[in-house]
Amino acid sequence: MVFETIIKGRKKVAKGTCEITFKRPEKFVFKAGQYIQIAIPELLSPDLRGNSRLFSVTSSPDDLENIRVVFRVSTSGFKQTLVSMPVGATVQIEQAAGSFVLPQSPKQQQIFVAGGVGISPFMSYFNQENTPFEKGQTTLFYGNQNEESAAYVTELRAFAKRYQSFSLQELYERPSSEFFRRNAQMYKDATWWVVGPPAMVGVVVNGLQLGGVDQNNIITEPFEGY
Ligand SMILES: Cc1cc2nc3c(=O)[nH]c(=O)nc-3n(C[C@H](O)[C@H](O)[C@H](O)COP(=O)(O)OP(=O)(O)OC[C@H]3O[C@@H](n4cnc5c(N)ncnc54)[C@H](O)[C@@H]3O)c2cc1C
């Protein structure tokens, strides 16, 4: 199903990183972790990859008014158009899709690994009204080039202060497989959820496998196109 909707707002959430809010159509449903396809009717500049992209939803499924997505701004015709379109402009979004659905009643410890804007699906989960932090132990490894480019890091630090069952590890160096191999041994029975650029996801998964994590306990969402 395709919905026509409008841009409600735009916000800088980190260095070179933009969050866009769309009006949530009444019949639009999704689960924390899923993504949407956004299509722009007319691009301002040409783009070899066309007029649509996939983005994970950042806002919570409980937010019935808004759908938010977050991305690094670049020179691509698609993103240049998206950051220039006025509030009220129309875009098309497809019904949410994807099997990367974060569990509402986790049975094991959850380890989340986000590279850059790969934080998006986890924010959708964290921002739910019925807070997931009290449902089990969650650790988030969050990798960015530096603090200025770490979207939502202030909110995440506040969650970590407030909930004992949530721990945040900020990483500001390129993660190595060795780092994740060592951590895999500490959290062998946890479920690992890994999101970010494909190369980063590959490095993390390699480390987890070397560290002995069962393949069934590694769930990934590579942001193809990065
Ligand atoms: C399931 C799924 C979910 C996804 N979710 C998200 C999401 O939540 N957020 C998200 O951002 N992406 C997400 N992606 C990826 C997204 O769909 C795009 O493929 C990605 O953002 C790259 O965008 P782009 O094609 O506009 O290219 P970009 O990589 O943004 O830009 C490409 C162009 O810009 C140039 N360029 C890029 N960076 C720079 C720079 N710093 N300086 C100068 N030139 C530059 C390149 O040379 C090229 O010309 C997801 C993908 C999948 C499959």
Image: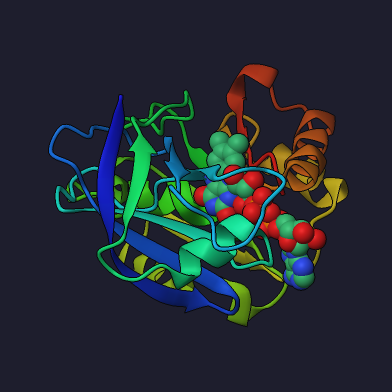
**Image check: 58 left or right of 43?**
left
Residue 141 visible in this rendered orientation of the protein: no
Residue at x 72% of width, y 49% of height: 226
Question: From the viewer's perspective, is residue 107 above or below residue 65?
Answer: above
At a point 73% along the width and 38% down the height, the residue shown is: 185
Quadrant of residue 117 in the image?
bottom right
Expressed as whole percent of the image width and height from the top left, the position of residue 132 reads 29, 45
Residue 176, horizontal then vertical, whole percent: 85, 52
Which residue sits at x=33%, y=30%? 95
Above or below, 212 against 135 in this view is above
Q: Is residue 55 above or below residue 163?
A: above
- The residue under the point 48% across, 29% down is 100
Q: Is residue 98 left or right of residue 220?
A: left
The front one of 89 and 149 is 89
- Picture quadrant where residue 7 is located: bottom left
| Above or below, comparing residue 209 to residue 152 in the picture | above
Colour setup of the view: rainbow
Q: Position of residue 57 (x, y in %)?
A: 40, 46
Q: Compare residues 203 and 188 and report the one nearer the observer.
A: 203
The x, y position of residue 69, in whole percent, is 42, 55
For this orientation, the residue located farthest to the top is 216
| Tally of marks | 0
